Amino acid sequence: MKSDLIALEQKIEQFLAFCQGLRAENQALRTRVAGLEDERQHLLDKIDTARTRLEALLIRLPEEQAEK
């Protein structure tokens, strides 16, 4: 009986350690996802800025060719 309780206690300790490991991994993944989402937004902003600048250049291009 006592050995059964000891074995059960060891399994519970292993399970708790496993859960703590999963929590730590989950937190690391959440942090990584947040960083990737920030990077994605930054890149989308850069694309939008580039698109705006390109559109402005395309508008000016025919005007410059017509003047020549």
Image: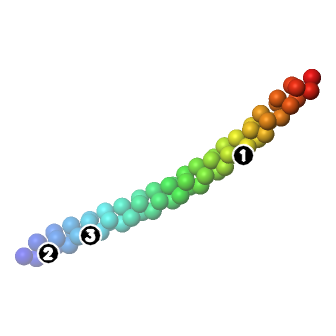
Q: CA distance from mark 1 to mark 2?
A: 66 Å
Specify the label residue 13 is tagged with: 3
Amino acid carrying label 1: it is Thr
Instruction: State the image quarter where residue 60 is shown.
Output: top right
Q: CA distance from mark 3 to mark 1?
A: 54 Å
Do callouts 1 and 2 mark residues in contact (Cβ within 8 Å)? no
Q: Nearer the viewer, residue 12 or 49?
A: 49
Residue topped by disc 1: 49
Give coordinates of residue 21: x percent, y percent.
37, 62
Q: Nearer the viewer, residue 26 or 3?
A: 26
Give the crowd class for mark 3: few <14, some 14-19, many >=20 residues within 10 Å: few
At horizontal 41% and vertical 59% (from top left) the residue drawn is 25
Give the crowd class for mark 1: few <14, some 14-19, many >=20 residues within 10 Å: few
Give the crowd class for mark 2: few <14, some 14-19, many >=20 residues within 10 Å: few
Q: Earlier in the sequence, mark 1 or mark 2?
A: 2
Give coordinates of residue 15: x percent, y percent.
26, 66
> For the N terminus, which image quadrant?
bottom left
Do callouts 2 and 3 mark residues in contact (Cβ within 8 Å)? no
Residue topped by disc 2: 5
Amino acid carrying label 3: it is Glu
